[in-house]
Amino acid sequence: MKNVISLKDLEQMVRNGQSLNNLPADSILTPSAREFLQDREMHPAASATVVTATAPTGKPTPPTKPLTSKSPQAELDAFFASPYAHSLKQQICEMGHRLWKRAYVDGNGGNMAIRVGEDIAICTPTLVSKGSLKPEDMCLVDFEGNQLCGTKKRTSEILMHLQMMKRQPKAIATCHCHPPYATAFAVAGIAPPTCMLPEYEVFCSVGVAPYRTPGSPDMGKLVAELTDQYNTILMANHGVVTWSHNNIEEAYWRMEIIEAYCRTIVVAGQLGKPINTFTGPQMKELLNIKQSLGFVDPRFSMKECELCDSGEWRPGATCAVPTNESQGVGFDADAEKAVQAITEQILKQMKT
């Protein structure tokens, strides 16, 4: 039986200091293993550089030497073929498969990126369904969008992800897709109303970016400008993009949360009953939790009466926090009487 050699086998041989020049003649190489050997032939110096290691637990560890777009190509190639980079590629593939199974993407839509250095990121390729992503499909790009590694061409919308990372230093991972209910709000150009479900309030803070052509610098700029206050951004007439300061899975979770929330409030609005909302103190508690987790939200400094917003779309919801009008703030009874008396006097004069 012929020996099948995988990318993992080759990487283990490199870590053990074994030569790759004497593989059995009848060996069968997997596509990723063949790509690995081809990359090493094109950049021989990479064979002398092992950028990452494996921890005692068996979990791949990040490179000990920080990488940038100015790092030697051999080091970038070695990193891109390392177990650590492979683990990140696998994470992107897993999130892509989840997006596809949940029908958050169609065709070859959607894209993701993970920051792996000062100004470099691993990202998804263009024209590949998220349901069939493989680690060997991934690309390495600098923050100007130039492709540094990978055989497939990088996603055409990478500039938006990179502009988000440049504007928001905390952004480690970004995820863009088209979940139907959340995208419906994006098409309407309005943010979902607030103060209804705790998971949404804690994990998401939602802004709306005006429409620009997908993949254009203008689109990326408008989205990036919102990342200081929002981690979930509706792109008008397009879709949703999220970012996380932890990992790509958290960025994906935000997609599940906002989609479930938008679907829930649309259905709740059809029940013909008033929708309950949180009180001011209840919202304050949720925002305190949110702040402790390191998430962003423009409402942290607001008063309780300002926290809930149904915006332009109110699905039968009534804010549980009394408004200034209901409290009588700003109403002066004496002034009202004086205005009424003057009005009556003017009307009498007009009749004479």
Image (cartoon, rainbow, N blue to C red):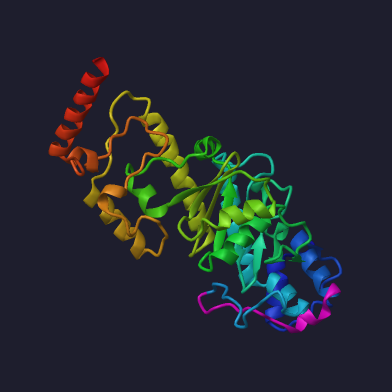
Q: Quadrant of residue 89?
A: bottom right
Please say whether residue 250 is visible from this viewpoint: yes
Single out the residue that lies furthest toward the front.
Answer: 352
Q: Quadrant of the C terminus?
A: top left
Residue at 28 percent across and 29 percent down: it is 274
Residue furthest out toward the top? 351
Q: Position of residue 105 (x, y in %)?
A: 61, 42
Q: Nearer the viewer, residue 234 or 350?
A: 350
Q: Decide if residue 27 is on the left or right side of residue 237.
A: right
Q: Is residue 99 above or below residue 84?
A: above
What residue occupies the far left of the structure in this picture? 334
Magenta stretch, main secondary structure, is loop
In this view of the protein, which residue sits in the foreground, 294 or 328?
328
Q: Where are the magenta residues, as a range?
A: 42-57
Residue 48 as seen in the image, left or right of residue 239? right
Can residue 90 be seen in the rendering of this structure?
no
**Looking at the image, residue 321 lies above or below residue 34:** above
Where in the figure is residue 81, as x and y percent of width and height? Answer: 71, 70
The answer to whether residue 9 is above or below residue 201 is: below
